[in-house]
Amino acid sequence: MRIAIIGGGAAGMMAGIQAAEGGAAVTLFEGNEKLGKKVYITGKGRCNLTNAKTYDEFFKGLAHNGRFMYSAMHFFSNLRMMDLIEGLGVPLNVERGERVFPASNKASDVSRALEGRLRALGVEIRLNARVEAVKTAPNGFLVRASGREEPFSRVILCTGGLSYPATGSDGFGLALAQALGHEVTDLQPSLIPILTREDWPKALSGLSLKNVEFSARRGKKLLFKELGEMLFTHFGLSGPLVLSASAHLVGLPLDEILLLIDLKPGLSHEQLDARLLRELTAEPRKQMAGLMAALAPKSLGLALLELAGIPEGTVASQLTRSQRGDLAGILKALPLHAAGFRPIEEAIITRGGLNIKQIDPSTMQSKLLPGLYLAGEMLDVDGYTGGFNLQIAWSTGALAGHSAAAGA
Ligand SMILES: Cc1cc2nc3c(=O)[nH]c(=O)nc-3n(C[C@H](O)[C@H](O)[C@H](O)COP(=O)(O)OP(=O)(O)OC[C@H]3O[C@@H](n4cnc5c(N)ncnc54)[C@H](O)[C@@H]3O)c2cc1C
């Protein structure tokens, strides 16, 4: 049985390993000069390759169409991925939030280990081999790359989404699947920086805030609330908290969304008000601009005073009770409004993709075209940050490879 795998990213490498272990003759086509180009930049070069949460908890990390993943996760779970990588000589560490990284903190170790396993299994790896077309043929498929057409009995398509196209995932694979009859749902960025309606965050570009709580509400509904780190940028907001929040906002009417930053999550409103009162009383002649330095980075402190309508030259003793209340209010719930997202090319992942109704979740085989298997980010399934998106690719890739080799 000859299997062609199109796309040598996370899903394609795993599909190759499983298909070859299943006894198939595997050819892996990768458009780039190396395998796993995106894997190299994951987790800021450290590769948060999976999340070690228990099976049930793991599914809470899947943001969209998580139920499609039951069989794939059952077949190739997060724990199995960890065993595989450690078995290939790459020790792992589990960090905060059960995020799993190579102990070396080098994403390249993960990619190289998988490539080593592919080579050991005799998978034919074709680099700089961009597939231009896939056609059906009497006994399978014809795959055209570099102007040459070759027959294969089965094809696994795993060319990724639309984000970070410089890594090779430019959406062409989705067009290949469409040409074979598959539907693509609405494609949107997820895990993406947020543009703000307000201009003041842009003036603070580069300022990073640690240990703040970021939340997003739609009316009375709390959509997201987490403690962590965020960043002001020249367009609005970014950083881990903001990227995570974005996955809860994609597709919602943004004009109904209120974003709130709690700059003092360790204090209640009353405790913060009491602290302000203490500091104002201790230094009655000090200007508010100076007093704010104890509460927030300088540039943010000045912005907060302006938002609270307090002239920066106001001396502590002049601050009225109501102004103090306003200041405490802003420190506890600094309001912002989302105006949009950065373009999909800058997203960590793509929300949307191949319509999962047309794919059998127990094999990853196309329901439209037997012998065609689909896996990875090109599917309309995605997760939050924390290693979930790579695990989607590992699990669906593994199941596709196994099923294709087994003829399931
Ligand atoms: C900056 C960044 C950081 C990330 N960090 C993490 C993280 O730490 N943890 C996590 O879980 N997820 C992370 N992700 C998400 C994760 O990398 C992806 O979800 C995952 O790589 C998807 O795997 P894939 O195999 O489906 O697609 P990809 O990894 O994109 O691989 C697709 C491959 O197909 C190839 N290809 C495309 N078209 C063709 C063609 N026509 N012919 C031949 N080859 C083709 C591409 O060159 C590419 O190598 C991150 C993403 C980004 C952008």
Image (spheres, rainbow, N blue to C red):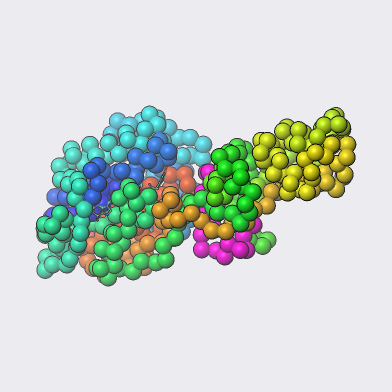
- Image label count: 0
| Magenta region includes residue 397 | no
| Most foreground residue, 72 or 115 | 115
| Most foreground residue, 182 or 175 | 175
Residue drawn 51% across and 50% down?
193
State which quadrant residue 300 falls in.
Answer: top right
Residue drawn 59% across and 54% down?
196
Residue 390 in view: yes
| Magenta region includes residue 254 | yes
Q: Main secondary structure of the magenta part?
A: helix
320 displayed left or right of 17: right
Locate residue 37, reporting x and y percent. 31, 43
393 displayed left or right of 219: left
Residue drawn 70% across and 49% down?
333
State which quadrant residue 352 falls in.
Answer: bottom left
Residue 22 in view: no
Q: What is the span of residues highlighted in magenta in the rendered image?
A: 239-258
In the rendered view, tell whether residue 210 sits above or below residue 342.
above
